Image (cartoon, grey):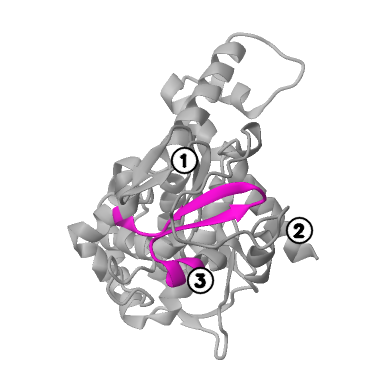
């Protein structure tokens, strides 16, 4: 029951961003392959529950019907995009929700600047410093969004994946030793840790760190010769795209070297995980994870726990189903 409640809350969080319930339901047929409603009231919600998570439901749906699929949430038509090529035809998954968030936070900053209120909130602390409006905006977004959850899970998965590949761990140690030596890590040196960034990018991809994004189709649109009706909820099945073999050779292998290729980094950027469209909370997560790895890898060997099998729990952010354990030994 608890798992279902967590799942339900997560699913609703995704839909809230698309203001799902502020618009009338659409029963217009789209011609897009997919599932007919299995329940007149709930649509395909029973099928999603049986699949354990929305991500796993979409994996099965895309495997059966292809990269562009449809299903029903209640009486609302939902379209899911499951390939990077289709995503290019639509919109960057982070752009809309970041713009809306910026507008709200800029308004709050303006209203609270230079004024006193009975209740002191986080943004008031930022306003007391000598920060620019842009810095206040970015810091507020980082800590208002899922920064802590994303950061914690990125660190967890990165450490776990390093225990599964001795070669990757050794290559990372060599880079850390060359760039940092015995000295402290600095912002300037973080920028020089290119292989570390590749490790974190591959962690995001392999773990499918944020498997779903969503947007409301405000106007009628077209993708791959199919019409998407107005007021259709469009899902970006990022978890499906991140394991698509047409974009990622050997997609289930943890291989940071794939990000030596410009195309791989470009693909990740299109999904909102790297480059100019990267979300601010993920930039924060990359920095924290880099600092953590710089401490661990320079001092310790990371080893897997024998017999441990890490299974993923796909919610708003992907996390391990059970506690993740590792063993360590001191570097000589």
Q: Position of residue 113 (x, y in %)?
A: 57, 12
Please tell me which of labels 1 and 3 falls first in the chain: 3
Could you tell me which secondary element the residue under label 1 belongs to?
loop
Mark 1 vs mark 2, foreground winner is 1
Q: Is residue 106 visible?
A: yes
Q: Nearer the viewer, residue 49 or 169?
A: 49
Residue that appears at 29% across and 45% down: 188
Q: In the image, is residue 126 part of the stretch drawn in magenta? A: no
Is the residue marked by circle 2 packed among few (<14), some (14-19), or many (20+) residues within 10 Å? Answer: few
State which region is magenta. Answer: 61-85
Residue that appears at 50% across and 29% down: 100
Q: Which residue is mark 3?
A: 60
Q: Position of residue 120 (x, y in %)?
A: 71, 23
Q: Quadrant of the N terminus?
A: bottom right
Is the residue marked by circle 3 packed among few (<14), some (14-19), or many (20+) residues within 10 Å? Answer: few
Residue that appears at 65% across and 53% down: 10
The disc placed on residue 229 is 1
The disc placed on residue 55 is none
Q: CA distance from mark 1 to mark 2?
A: 31 Å
Q: Which residue is mark 2?
A: 5
Q: Nearer the viewer, residue 124 or 72?
A: 72
Q: Nearer the viewer, residue 255 or 297?
A: 255
Could you tell me which secondary element the residue under label 2 belongs to?
helix
Image quadrant in which you'd find residue 35 = bottom right
Please tell me which of labels 1 and 2 falls first in the chain: 2
């Amino acid at each position: 029951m608890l798992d279902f409640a967590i799942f339900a809350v997560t699913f609703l969080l995704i839909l809230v961003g698309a203001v799902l319930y502020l618009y009338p339901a659409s029963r217009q047929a789209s011609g897009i392959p997919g599932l007919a409603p299995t329940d007149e009231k709930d649509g395909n919600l029973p099928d999603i529950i049986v699949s354990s998570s929305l991500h796993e439901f979409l994996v099965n749906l895309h495997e059966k019907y292809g990269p562009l699929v449809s299903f029903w949430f209640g009486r609302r038509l939902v379209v899911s995009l499951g390939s990077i090529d289709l995503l290019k035809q639509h919109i960057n998954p982070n752009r809309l929700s970041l713009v809306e968030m910026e507008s709200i936070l800029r308004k709050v900053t303006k209203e609270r600047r230079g004024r006193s209120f009975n209740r002191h909130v986080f943004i008031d602390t930022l306003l007391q410093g000598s920060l620019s409006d842009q810095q206040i905006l970015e810091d507020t977004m980082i800590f208002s969004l899922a920064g802590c959850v994303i950061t914690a899970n990125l660190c967890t998965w990165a450490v776990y994946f390093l225990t599964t590949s001795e070669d990757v761990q050794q290559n990372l140690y060599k880079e850390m030793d060359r760039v940092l030596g015995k000295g402290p890590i600095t912002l300037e040196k973080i920028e020089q840790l290119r292989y570390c960034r590749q490790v974190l990018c591959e962690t995001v991809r392999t773990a499918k760190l944020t498997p779903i994004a969503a947007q409301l189709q405000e106007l009628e649109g077209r993708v791959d010769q199919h019409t998407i009706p107005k007021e259709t909820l469009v899902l970006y099945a990022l978890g499906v795209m991140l394991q698509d073999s047409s974009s990622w050779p050997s997609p289930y292998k943890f291989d940071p070297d794939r990000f030596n290729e410009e195309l791989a980094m470009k693909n990740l950027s299109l999904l909102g995980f790297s480059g100019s469209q990267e979300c601010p909370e993920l930039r924060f997560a990359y920095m924290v994870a880099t600092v953590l790895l710089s401490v661990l890898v320079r001092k310790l060997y990371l080893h897997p726990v024998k017999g441990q099998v890490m299974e993923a729990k796909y919610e708003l952010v992907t996390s391990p189903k059970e506690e993740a354990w590792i063993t360590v030994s001191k570097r000589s």
